[in-house]
Amino acid sequence: RTMGYITLFEKLTKTESLDFLENKGQLIFFVKENNAKKAAGKLGSNLKRLSNLLKKKIKILELSEDPKKFVEGLIFPLEPSLIELKEGKIILSFRTTEERARIIGRNGSNLEFLSKLVENHHKLKLKVIS
C-alpha cells in the first residue's frame, strides 16, 4: 500500500517523494527543498485530487538541511515566537496557550510525533517552552 501511495503521488505531482509517513489517517510526503509548491500544484490542485482519490488528508513537507526551517515546515501554519537551536535541542515558544496546546496535542501525541520526526531527520531533541 505504501508503495502505491508514493507511486501515485509521484505520477500526479511529477515530484519525487524522498520519504513517506502515515499518521492518524493523514498521509505525509517529504519532498526536496523548494519543491512543495510544485507538488501541491496550482491552487493546491494536485493536493485536492490526491486527497479525493485516496480519501485521506495529505500533507507535503520539504526536507530541509536547516533544522529550524524543517521544524517551521512541520508546524505550519503555526508560527512560534521563538525557535532556537541550543545544545542539541530545538526550542520552541509560542505566544498563546492555544498554539502551545495544538503543538503538544492530546496526551502529548502531536509533540511525540514531531519529536520523532526531528530526531530521525536531524538527530535533535524538540522542546516546547511557555
Image (cartoon, rainbow, N blue to C red):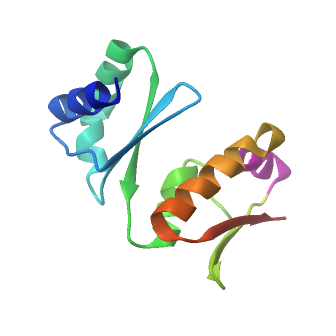
Is 98 included in the stretch rendered in magenta? yes
Q: Quadrant of the N terminus?
A: top left
Please report the bounds of the magenta region as a residue range.
96-104
Q: Position of residue 47 (x, y in %)?
A: 33, 29
Q: Quadrant of the C terminus?
A: bottom right
Number of numbered discs overlaid on the protein picture: 0
127 in relation to 110, above or below: below
Q: Residue 17 vs residue 67: left or right? A: left
46 in relation to 90, above or below: above
Residue appearing at x 80%, y 37% in the figure = 106
Residue appearing at x 76%, y 48% in the figure = 104
Q: Residue 31 vs residue 124: left or right? A: left
Q: Position of residue 5 (x, y in %)?
A: 31, 27
Query: Quadrant of residue 94 in the image?
Result: bottom right
Residue appearing at x 61%, y 52% in the figure = 114
Is 8 included in the stretch rendered in magenta? no
Q: Residue 113 vs residue 54: left or right? A: right
Q: Position of residue 20 (x, y in %)?
A: 38, 41
Q: Position of residue 90 (x, y in %)?
A: 64, 72
Q: Residue 35 vs residue 2: left or right? A: left
Residue appearing at x 75%, y 41% in the figure = 105
